[in-house]
Image (cartoon, rainbow, N blue to C red):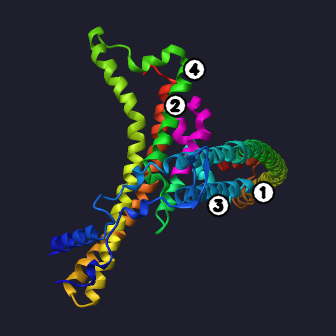
Amino acid sequence: MNFALTQTAIDPIHQFQVSKWLDLSIGGIDISFTNASGFMLLGVVLCIAFFGYAASKRALVPGRTQSMAEIGYGFVADMVRSTAGEEGLRFFPFVFTLFFFVFFANMIGMVPYAFTTTSHLVVTGALAILVISIVIGFGIWKNGLKFFKLFAPSGAPFLIYFILVPIEVISFLARPVTLALRLFANMLAGHIMLKLFATFAAQLIGAAISGTVLLGVVGLLAFGMGVALNALELLVAGLQAYVFAILTCVYLNDALHPSH
Amino acid sequence: MLIALLAQEAAHGAEHMPDDAPPPFPPFEPWHMPGQLFWLAILFAVLYFALSRFILPKMSDTIEKRSDRIASDLDQASVLNEQATEAQQALELRIAQAKAKARETAAKAKQKIDDEVSAQTARVDAEIEKKLDAAESRITEMRAKAMQNVEQIAIDTADAMTARFGLKASPADLKKAVSASLK
């Protein structure tokens, strides 16, 4: 049973390979423009182009593009308002940028051969640290030391605080980690699965053509699975952008109103 | 069989590795991290700047204008609605007034006609009464006259009859006897 199946190795990790497009370095630090930067640039350009075009219309009765952009605007505005309150709206541009930055990156990642910028922990980690820095910075600037009440919710018996405060501190410190890991892991795992099933389907159907019918049946099953996974990954791409943005709102709400 | 294939696959893959060391996992390769962070910072900042400075204010302006316009349109609509209701009420009032006036006029006309009819009826009745009275009086007169004639005839007859018997009665006695028997 030695057929053409194994000629190309399945390498689901290859799609995350960063390759240099343009060699750059400042002060000995490598800041080359890579495929990751290129697709990130594409997302930002598409985002600015879409919203810029939609915003330039300013029609009283919106057309399709303007309608879509305004639905996006209303969606993020409602999300901020419902989780962080009216005061949270001062962070609306930030949450909007964050949501659509991640959303466009995830969606571009769904295109075959495109690079998924959010599948790199350094990117999601940087975004998560940015969020948590804003939460801490703004929380202390606005509430002063009262911000640390966040770690000691009022109303508990005195002795409980010895357990409660460490738990609250740990859960707060876990926030940026989970925020970054959730998006990174979802995108990474999803794209690995997609790649595996797609390659598997192609190879098995290829094998079937060269004679083994049973492998073809399995190949078709793998193909169906790939299609289903594609739909699921589209959902995950949107959902993870939403989760990232809404958790940002929840954390910002803590900075705005630290006493629970 | 599939597991066997996968195992073979893995073995095959391993054969083609450049070294025995496993290949680095790209997201954890350190060399591209500064570059990624650098470009992320620039691109995120550009996106934030473009959205918060230019695009979002424009959109919020458009949305606000629209909601203002909708609110003012609704206001205007309610004002117009009120006006229409007022006009309708005024119209209803005028219709009611006109109806009342019409009813009044009709009643007046009816009254006038009724009056005329009753006056005329009264006049005609009176005339008929008068005529009846005249006729009745004439009848009575004629009857009296006739009775008188009857009396005279009876007297004459009685006179003739008494004369046949060879008697002679005075006219006064005859008259008395006749009128007594007539009664």
Front position among marks 2 and 4: 2
Q: Label 2 to label 3, Cα distance in Å?
A: 35 Å
Front residue of A10/A166: it is A10
The spot of residue B14 in percent (x, y) is 26, 67
For residue B143, above or below residue A171:
below
Mark 4: secondary structure: helix
The label on residue A133 is 2
Residue denoted by label 4: A142
Question: Is residue A11 on the magenta stretch?
Answer: no
Q: Amino acid at mark 1?
A: Ala
Q: Residues within 10 Å of mark 4 (few under 14, many from 20)?
A: some
Question: In the displayed structure, does residue B99 sit left or right of residue A26?
Answer: right
Horizontal and vertical percent position of residue A242: 47, 47
Q: Are marks 4 and 3 on the same chain?
A: yes
Where residue B134 appears, as percent x and y from the top left, is 84, 52
- Using the image, name the chain to which the residue with label 4 belongs: A
Per the image, label 2 sits on a secondary structure element best described as helix
Give the residue number, with chain letter if any, for mark 3. Answer: A65
Whether callout 1 and callout 4 share a subunit is answered no
Name the foreground residue: B159 vs B19.
Answer: B19
